[in-house]
């Protein structure tokens, strides 16, 4: 199987994990009792992260390889700028998601007035804070940006070595 097909399948798997974590995360409804049914979403969350970390490493390697083979693209500032803007937008969205969670639950686990006061940081209401579409897109953008930076550094080292060997 070609590398690009395997990468695409892994990307699709990451998107499926976003939905699995979301589906298995309980939603607190004000005025209702909290769930005591454990945390089934932690299975999806842990599995997602097990596949996510190598996926991000592979994204960095692929990005570095792509940009290293494309010197014209490497010189353009629009790609890293686009990745940085996307990263910042996703970070702002994730912060908004965390604030909405905090408001819905009356605070975090360190607040005695919170409905999740007696839970740990990872519980049946918070799974989506640790793996969601914002995190997926932000981390892909960051991996691409790091891959671009590594290719840029390698290109500069090669260029300086070529210049010093001609002198």
Image (cartoon, rainbow, N blue to C red):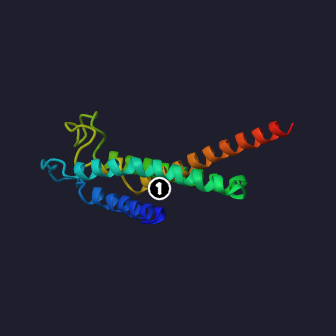
Image quarter hosting the N terminus? bottom left
Q: Most extreme residue toward the front, as rendered?
A: 165
At x 14%, y 51%, the residue is 33
Residue at the right extreme of this rendering = 167
**Side (left or right) of 114 relative to 60:** left
Query: Circle 1 is placed at which residue position?
Result: 137
Q: Which quadrant of the structure image shows residue 27? A: bottom left
How many numbered marks appear? Answer: 1
In the picture shown, does residue 59 fall above or below 121? below
Q: Name the spot of residue 148 as percent of width and height, x first.
A: 61, 49
Horizontal placement of 9 versus 143: left or right? left
For mark 1, give the secondary structure: helix
Q: Residue at x 26, y 42 (%)?
A: 122
Q: Position of residue 152 (x, y in %)?
A: 67, 46
Nearer-the-camera pick, 101 or 72: 72
Q: Is residue 162 above or below residue 128?
A: above
Q: Residue at x 41, y 48 (%)?
A: 54
Q: Is any atom of residue 112 visible in this view? A: yes
Left or right: 41 as drawn, with respect to 78: left
Q: Can I make out residue 96 in this image?
A: no
Left or right of 102: which side holds 7?
right
Give percent across and percent down for residue 40: 19, 52
Name the quadrant of the C terminus.
Answer: top right
Residue farthest toward the left in the current orientation of the protein = 37
Q: Tag 1: Cα neighbours inside 10 Å, few (<14), some, or many (≥20)?
A: some
Give the percent coordinates (x, y) of residue 69.
65, 56
Q: Nearer the viewer, residue 114 or 41?
A: 41
Q: Residue at x 52, y 48 (%)?
A: 142
């Amino acid at each position: 199987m070609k590398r690009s097909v395997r990468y695409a399948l892994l990307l699709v798997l990451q998107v499926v994990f976003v939905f699995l974590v979301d589906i298995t995360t309980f939603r607190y409804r004000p005025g209702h009792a909290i769930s005591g049914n454990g945390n089934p979403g932690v299975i999806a969350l842990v599995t997602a992260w097990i596949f996510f970390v190598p996926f991000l490493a592979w994204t960095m390697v692929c990005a570095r390889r792509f940009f290293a083979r494309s010197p014209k693209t490497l010189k353009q500032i629009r790609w890293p700028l686009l990745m940085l803007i996307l990263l910042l937008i996703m970070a702002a969205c994730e912060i908004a998601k965390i604030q909405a969670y905090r408001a819905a639950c009356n605070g975090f686990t360190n607040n005695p007035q919170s409905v999740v006061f007696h839970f740990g940081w990872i519980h049946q209401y918070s799974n989506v804070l640790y793996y969601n579409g914002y995190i997926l897109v932000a981390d892909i953008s960051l991996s691409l940006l790091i891959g671009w930076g590594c290719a840029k550094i390698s290109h500069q080292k090669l260029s300086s070595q070529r210049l010093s060997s001609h002198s």
